[in-house]
Amino acid sequence: MKGFDNIFQGRSVLACKDFTPAELNYMVNFGLHLKDLKKNNIPHRYLEGKNIALLFEKTSTRTRSAFVVASHDLGANPEYMDSTGTQFGKKESVEDTAKVLGSMFDGIEFRGYKQTTAEGLAEFAGVPVWNGLTDEWHPTQMLADFMTVKEKFGHLKGLTLAFVGDGRNNMANSLLVAGTMLGVNVHIVAPAELHPTQEVRDIAESFAKQTGAKFLITDDIAEGVKGANVIYTDVWVSMGESNWEERVHLLRPYQVNMDLMKMTGTPDDDLIFMHCLPAFHDTNTTYGQEIFEKYGLKDMEVTDEVFRSKYAWQFTEAENRMHSIKAMMAVTLGNLYIPASAVNGCTGGCGCSCKD
Ligand code: CP
Ligand code: NVA
């Protein structure tokens, strides 16, 4: 063994597609392992003394909190920076910002608009860059989401996840690709105007061929949710967008309610509801109140009834953001012993889900 043997060390996490299915699966499993350690008060300070920059162009509750708590648990020091408090974007380019932050910090989280910004930071920083959400992809959410699905069902392969809503946003893109990478059948259920791009479908297609997963893009709700184990939805209008009128009109029929949950035909024990959050499930938010006044809708993408039902797993999912982000930071920055054989050479006896 040389200085270290870790196939993740020093790598950025910009999108799931940049990893192999086995590598993605490894990170999901490592998140479950670190959750176990935390629940049993077993220290795991793999990043002792490291400094982590958290650079946000868009707002966040979960991602920001997860990176902060994960950093502390790993022994690292996080520093939050937003676009109003730095020179980034207005007075300083992506390249120059990356060089400066990379000279002081050991890893950089970035949340913002363009995927090319995350890529630019990764190109010039010289340290791992972790994508905390862009308009196109939300890879750290995928680690938490499939960790949550595995926590509930004990395996991933062969399950069916139906995403109902805006089929072209960062969440739909990410679930379609990460799901097919992990052997989960993914259905995108959305009006034709909001179906995924051909580029994203092509990526999913290439992974589906490798893993045997199947995917379906449809505007037919009954067809799309039939047999689903996971009903997943997201906001109708994502950060950076403002087209409420169009989205309310297009997506109102796609609201996740109890009738839609029943349309799956799946037995209760084999069915869960997930949402990356934040969610519009009542009128207790500024936007929720405005939409109620304008369109008479008390809830948008999911009814309060489903959100508070026995199917709801969105808060376990939110907690898992922390454990999975911790796993990702640890494997890419912690000099852990992770030889390729531990990730790709799995023969199915290790308890992981590669051969499930
Ligand atoms: N799911 C998610 O990314 O939440 P935040 O926007 O609060 O980070
Ligand atoms: N699609 C949503 C996801 C939030 C976690 C957004 O980009 O606003």
Image: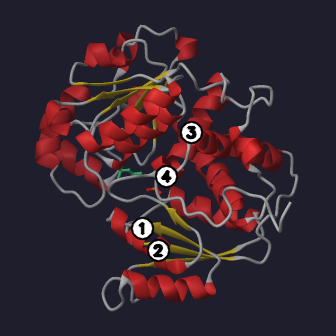
Give the residue at mark 3: 21
Q: Are marks 1 and 3 in contact (CB under 8 Å)?
A: no
Residue at label 2? 123
Q: Is residue 295 above or below residue 57?
A: above
Viewer-nearest residue: 348 or 191: 348
**Other-residue count near label 4 (Cα within 10 Å), few / some / many at <14 / 14–19 / ≥20:** few
Q: Find out whether the residues at labels 2 and 1 contact each other: C-beta distance under 8 Å.
A: yes
Q: Please say whether residue 197 is visible from this viewpoint.
A: no
Q: Which mark is residue 281?
A: none
- Residue at 34% x, 23% y is 257
The span from disc 1 to disc 3 (Cα, nearest Å) is: 21 Å
* Type of the residue with mark 4: Asp
Q: Is residue 355 visible?
A: yes
Where residue 19 appears, as percent x and y from the top left, is: 54, 49
Q: Which residue is mark 1?
A: 119
Instruction: Find the distance from the CA under tag 2 to the CA under tag 1.
Output: 6 Å
In this view, 332 is above or below 56 = above
> Marks 3/2: CA distance?
23 Å
